[in-house]
Image (cartoon, rainbow, N blue to C red):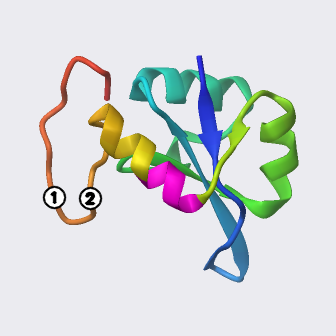
Amino acid sequence: MTIYIDPPTWPGHGRMWSHLISDVSYDELHTFAARLGVPRRAFERDHYDIPAQRYAELVAAGAVQVSSREVVRLLHAAGLRRPKGRHQARDSRGS
């Protein structure tokens, strides 16, 4: 299982955020997030939004640090990218 996280460089709601992804399946991503107490409501389309104060904790738990550009590349390569504003049917990689 490999889970990836980009640096907390995305502003929103008065703080900075990272994106947590899987390059295998949404199920793998949900399992990792649940194990660390990341609420399901933080899942948006194809990633979890992670506040900056949790970044080091998720890296220590095994999330691999990559650039934001690499997050997008990995999602595309795995066929897991869900662009904003598009509805895609669920597939065998999970919800």
Looking at the image, which is closer to me, 54 or 73? 73
Give the residue at x 65% y 54%: 6
* Pointer 1 with pointer 2, Cβ within 8 A: yes
Looking at the image, which is closer to me, 59 or 54? 59
The percent coordinates of residue 20 (x first, y second) are 59, 45
The percent coordinates of residue 54 (x first, y second) are 81, 51
The relative height of residue 82 versus residue 69 in the rendered view (above or below) is above
Write down the quadrant of residue 33 in the picture: top right
Question: Which residue type does callout 2 highlight?
Answer: Pro
Question: Which residue type does callout 1 highlight?
Answer: Arg
> What residue is pinned by disc 1?
86
Give the residue at x 33% y 38%: 77
Query: Which residue lies most toward the bottom here?
Result: 14
Instruction: Tell me the distance, in whole angstroms, between the alpha carbons under discs 1 and 2.
Output: 6 Å
The relative height of residue 38 versus residue 61 in the rendered view (above or below) is below
Disc 1 packing (10 Å; few <14; some 14–19; many ≥20): few
Question: Magenta-highlighted stretch: main secondary structure?
Answer: helix
Q: Which residues are magenta?
A: 68-72
> What residue is pinned by disc 2?
83
